[in-house]
Amino acid sequence: MSSTPGITVPAGTLGTSRRRLLRRPGRPALTRWATPLALLALWQLLSATGVLAEHTLASPTTIATTTWDLIDDGTLPQALWVSLRRALLGLLLGSAVAVAAATVSGLSRTGEALVDPTLQMIRTIPLFGLVPLFILWFGIGELPKILLVALGVVIPLYLNLHAAFRAIDPELTEVATTLKLTRAERWRHLIVPTVLPGALVGFRQSLGIAWLSLIVGEQIAADAGLGYMINNARDFLQTDVIVVGLLAYAVLGLVTDAIVRVAERRALRYREKPGRA
Amino acid sequence: MAVDTLTDPAVRLRGVQRRFGDHVVLDGLDLDIAPGEFVGLLGRSGSGKTTLLRLLAGLGDQTTGEIHTGSEVAVVFQDPRLFPWRTALENVALGLRGADPLDRARAALGEVGLAGREGAWPRELSGGQRQRVALARALVREPDLLLLDEPFSALDALTRISAQRLVNELWERHRPAVLLVTHDVEESLLLADRTLVLEHGRIAYDERFAAARPRRREDPALVARRKELLELLGVDQA
């Protein structure tokens, strides 16, 4: 992805790694780890012999010690918490808007006409191109960072939800009518379960965009958080701290994605083949 | 309002009309079905039999005429139409009012021979089992009118026979009025006490066939009636 990151969703990026895992289930773990471990050893060797200068890239062992120090003195947990909070608030706000918009456009033609074209237009605006405007409008505090995350979250979640609402089975709707289900029961037994798979796929894509938006957002004159930690380190040529910050972003992304994946598996267990449990 | 039978009929239609554009599907239809009566409805495709069933199920809009049905109407469609994200038991109990819905649903599943499969997801069940869940979902509501829309047509021949037997048993035990829409003349004669043929939106044939149950396909009376009906339906019997 060399182009400017827009709000457009990199479809399928999250699914590929799992598919690859499924394709070769019997591969021994050792072989899989061989290349990364060899690269790590080479990196350490180059650092130790001075070929790779400390101010270009710190050695793996230095990074490990720095990680421990940053955890020990509270810098990393503090920065993590600030960044996590921004991401969660943005996710919450963005999800709320996406769910509201998708519900309005998913349940009536008028609603769709009112909501859908606007969101489809917003979709084409490159998200990170909005950063200068956001700074002008919302200053350099927490607000533009949270809003950038929120805006990044809205579009993929909305698009997936919108498609999911279209997938409500008219035959099951008739069953709901003949069983005289109440409005609440229709939501609980028909609409929510139909929409859920799309919602979860959309949410996972949104998560990916959320972390990306956060990293960009935290470049805006932050005074706390992982972005601040990284920018500070750049000023002092602390490549070890920069790498720790990047690793922290990666871990946050992986952990949140894993949480949604577990939720996905649980919510969609009725689709599993018999006996695979 | 005068009622000519002792109890209210399960179905009472007067001058029912339904059109799609210029095409008249039901043309001033009159029909009475007595409580507990098992009626088979035959007709070529496009004759309006599904339209009729749907309007009795409360799924037909823009219909004119007088329509009365019992208060509790249940439907079994051609496909089981189970909610895939609900277990067999939850599907049967869906929207069930009154006391102990889950216990009643469990009993209904037992009655259709699916005791022990309460926790199964629909996709874990065979086609025949799924259709039985749909039958249990209809029966558990203790309907006065049970509408069956070609409920066996998607099943293989052997499964169909046992499903037909099951419907016969359940009808004898619970005695709802039944309207069975089918294109299988033999099926209607095996199960129903009265067979209707719908043609051009009107009832063209309405005769009783009340042989003792359980009925056999080889029964000469049934075979003779079958021939008569097939001729009426314009099926060439070489």
Image (spheres, coloured by chain):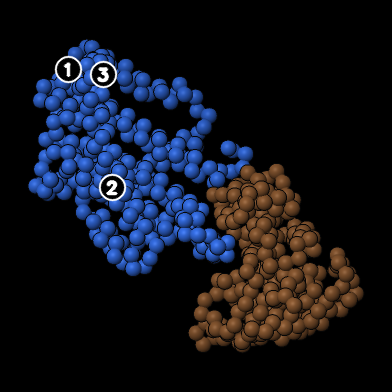
Q: Mark 2 to mark 1: distance in Å? A: 41 Å
Which is more toward the observer, A63 or B203? B203
Residue B117 sits in quarter: top right
Does residue A63 show up?
no
For mark 3, does the 10 Å Cα neighbourhood hold few (<14), some (14 to 19), or many (20 or more) residues? few
Tag 1 residue = A54
The chain under label 1 reads A
Mark in front: 2 vs 1: 2
Discs 1, 3 touching: Cβ within 8 Å: no
Q: Which mark is residue A94?
A: 2
Q: Which mark is residue A71?
A: 3
Of the numbered discs 1 and 3, the one sitting upstream in the chain is: 1
- The residue lying at 57 percent from left, 71 percent from top is B58
Mark in front: 1 vs 3: 3
- Amino acid, disc 1: Glu
- Amino acid, disc 2: Gly
**Element carrying mark 1:** loop
- Residue A228 lies left or right of residue A203; in this view the side is left
| Residue A106: image location, x then y, percent | 38, 60
- Residue A238 lies left or right of residue A247; in this view the side is left
| Residue A163: image location, x then y, percent | 40, 57
The chain under label 3 reads A
| Residue B156: image location, x then y, percent | 72, 59
- Residue A34 lies left or right of residue B186; in this view the side is left
**Element carrying mark 2:** helix
